[in-house]
Amino acid sequence: DAKTTQPPSMDCAEGRAANLPCNHSTISGNEYVYWYRQIHSQGPQYIIHGLKNNETNEMASLIITEDRKSSTLILPHATLRDTAVYYCIVRVVDSGSRLTFGEGTQLTVNP
Amino acid sequence: GAVVSQHPSWVICKSGTSVKIECRSLDFQATTMFWYRQFPKQSLMLMATSNEGSKATYEQGVEKDKFLINHASLTLSTLTVTSAHPEDSSFYICSARGVAKNIQYFGAGTRLSVL
């Protein structure tokens, strides 16, 4: 699976949009971009995933650049409960693949 | 999203004893289950992958005789830490993926403390 690069930490004001970047310049054509987050002392929580089109769900939006070498996770109105480590992972969707976690981005939402 | 239940959430045991952790997929059939370990201030490390009815595939450096994995049904996998020692103290997290293969869901984790 392709390697991803994320900033180690980011801050965001409560109520503002949080934009978390991820670089995956070696991504292959059949690899999806996944985002998970881990709130302290809990298991990771699935947020969203996409292949090449932008995606939106009730939690977030995923913007993937046209060349697919980078993406941005957007939390439109961050709350204190969104403080967590956010992981960007690229993965082929097949029976043999699995999620490999990097260091992620520690997002701190401030009041 | 789908629910993965992990039990117990916290366990303390004496050195030399064995500990079993259960992982259940509550509302979907998990054809593949995964076990991760996470040490303080570190990221998740994959320990092993198991497919229902098959032997688990362990990552390099993970002792298969120490970390016994059973995936006997489509909704249950267990991890047994045999002869636990203080260095096995960690946060163990299970994960499950269904037939669709596109999303992996995670349990809440089990914090193991070996005295």
Image: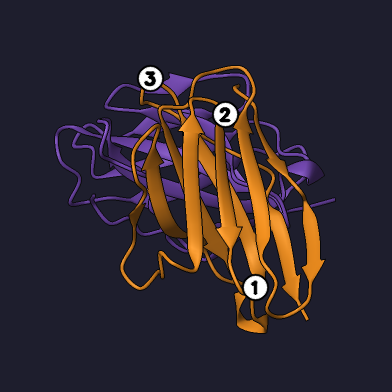
Quadrant containing the N terminus of chain B is top right
Q: Where is residue B84 in the image (x, y as percent from the top left)?
A: 64, 74
| Residue marked by disc 3 | B99
| Residue marked by disc 1 | B40
Disc 3 on helix, strand or loop?
loop
**Position above or below: A92 against A20:** above
Residue lying furthest left: A29
In the picture, one chain is purple; tell me its letter: A
A22 horizontally vs B4: left or right:
left
Q: Where is residue B89 in the image (x, y as percent from the top left)?
A: 67, 74
B36 horizontally vs B17: left or right:
left
What distance separates the C-alpha of mark 2 from that of mark 1?
28 Å
Q: Is the Cβ of the residue at disc 3 closer than 8 Å to that at disc 2?
A: no
Identify the image quadrant of residue B18. Answer: bottom right
The amino acid beneath tag 3 is Val
Tell me the tag on residue A60: 2
Q: Which of marks 2 and 1 is in front?
A: 1
Report crowding for label 2: few under 14, some 14 to 19, many 20 or more residues within 10 A (C-alpha): some
Q: Do labels 3 and 2 share a chain?
A: no
Disc 1 on helix, strand or loop?
loop
Q: Position of residue B99 (x, y in %)?
A: 38, 19
The amino acid beneath tag 1 is Pro
